[in-house]
Amino acid sequence: MENLESSTDCKETVSPLNNSGSTVNSTVSCHDGKAMGFVLVHAGAGYHSESKAKEYKHACKRACQKAVDRLRAGGLALEAVTAALIELEDSPFTNAGTGSNLNLSGEIECDASIMDGKSLNYGAVGALSGIKNPVLVARRLLSETQKGKLSAGRIPPCFLVGKGAEQWAISHGIPACPTEKMTTKFSLSGYKRNKRKMELAEQVETKRKRQLCGHENDFGCLEPVGDIMVEGEENNSACLDTVGAVVVDREGNVAAAVSSGGLAMKHPGRVGQAAHYGCGCWAENARDVSLYSTAVSTSGSGEHLIRTMLARECSTAMQAENAHQALLEAMQNKFISSPFLAGEDCVLGGVIVLRCCTCGEAQRSEDIQALLVEFLWSHTTESMCVGYMSAQDSKARTHISRLPPGAVAGQSLAIEGGVCRLGTVSD
C-alpha cells in the first residue's frame, strides 16, 4: 500500500477514459482540519442536460454537506451516508423519493438499500409507496437486525417490499406520505408524455397484427413509432436510475447507500437493483491490514445491474494494487462484456467507489489517525453527476462526467477519480 506522505493532502486525478485508455490529469488541494472523513455521492447515471446541470450539482453539493456535517459532529459512516441520501431523495430533480418516476399505474414505488461496512449488516425496501424517504426504512431495518431475534425466536427481516414494507415503516414511527405529495410537475408531465407514446405504439402494433392476419388488407402504410424514451425526451435531463453515496468516517468505517424511483412506466411491483443485495450498494471494512475497506453504490438499468451483481463485483476488484485499472477491467469484463448480459447490445450503468486504508506513520503511532482514500466513478451511460467532499474541505466539489466524444453509450465507458490523504491528531 502507498505510504502516507501528508496528513492533509487531497488530490483529484480527473481521468476521462474510453476503451482506448487515453487520460487527462489535473490536481486540486483541500483544507487542513481536525475532523476526518470523506463522502462521494451520485445523482444517477443516464443523461443530464446542460440546462439542468446546475440543479443536479446543487443537489450533490447539499448531500455532501449534510454528510460532512454529521462527520464533523462525530457521527459514523452509517449516519453520514443516511444524511446524504435523505438530501438526494428530497430533491425534486432526482429519481428517488420526491420526484420519482411514476409506474404504469401512475404511482410511485421506490427501492432503497444501505450497508454498514463495520457490521456487514444490510437493510432494504422494494416497491415501497407512501414513504417520503425510503432510505430511512432501509436504515431502520438494518438497525433492527442488530437487536437480535424477535419474539418466539423469529429472525428479523432485512428486506421488505410493497404494502408490507409500508406498514412496517409506519409501525416503527416513520410517517406516511401520499404519492401526490411526492409527485412533481416534471415527473407527472413525463408520465403523461410516456403514456401517450405507449398508447400510440400499442395502436400501431394492433393495426400491424391485423394487417398481417389479413383483417385489414387495405390498411396502407404505417408510420413507425420509435421506442419510448421512458427516461425522458431528448434535450431534457433524465437519469436512468438511482442516487447513492459512499462514506468513510474518522475510524475508517465505510458505509454505502442507494435509493431509486426505478424506471419510468415500470410494471407495478417491479424491484430494481437499488434494493437487491450486492447489486445496489456494498460496504465492507478491511478484515486485515493488508486489505482495503471498500464502499460502492451503483446506478443505471436495474436489470443489467442485478444480473451482474455489479456493486459486489466492483468491491472485490478494489483489492487489486491499481484501483483505476481494476475498476476499468471490472466495468469492461464484469459488466459491458459480462456473459450474463450476452444478449444485450446496450449495457447501461454506473458506479461510485471508494477504498481506504490506514497508511504510513498511522500504522506505527497511536497518536496519529490517518487514512488514504481513493475514490472513483465510472459509467457507460452518456453522463453521471457526482459530488465529493472531505470533512476538512470548506465546500463540496461537483462534476458531470460525460463519455468521450464519439463514444457509444452502453458500449463504451468513462472513468475518473482521485486520491485524498486525511489525517488528524487524536485528543
Image (tube, rainbow, N blue to C red):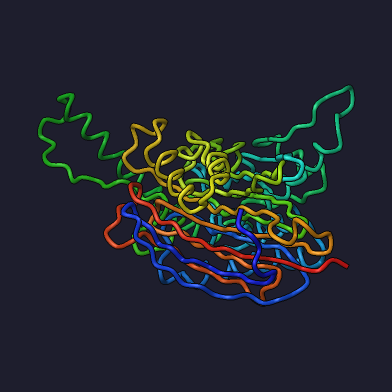
User: In the image, residue 234 lies at what x, y percent?
Assistant: 34, 60
Instruction: Kindly identify the residue that appears in the image at 80 percent across and 36 percent down.
Output: 145
Is residue 245 rendered to the left or right of residue 331?
A: right
Between residues 409 and 105, which one lies in front from this camera angle? Answer: 409
Is residue 229 rendered to the left or right of residue 84?
A: left
User: In the image, residue 261 lies at what x, y percent?
Assistant: 56, 49
Residue 155 higher or lower than 253, as above or below: above
User: In the image, residue 135 lies at what x, y percent?
Assistant: 68, 49
User: In the image, residue 46 lies at what x, y percent?
Assistant: 43, 55
Between residues 387 and 107, which one lies in front from this camera angle? Answer: 387
Instruction: Kindly identify the residue that appears in the image at 57 percent across and 71 percent down.
Output: 397
Between residues 254 and 105, which one lies in front from this camera angle? Answer: 254
Quarter of the image for the C terminus: give it: bottom right
Answer with the quarter of the image where residue 352 lies: bottom right
Instruction: Kindly identify the residue that appears in the image at 12 percent across and 41 percent down.
Output: 221
Residue 401 higher or lower than 104, as above or below: below
Between residues 42 and 259, which one lies in front from this camera angle? Answer: 42
Is residue 392 rendered to the left or right of residue 236?
A: right
Q: How many marks on residues?
A: 0
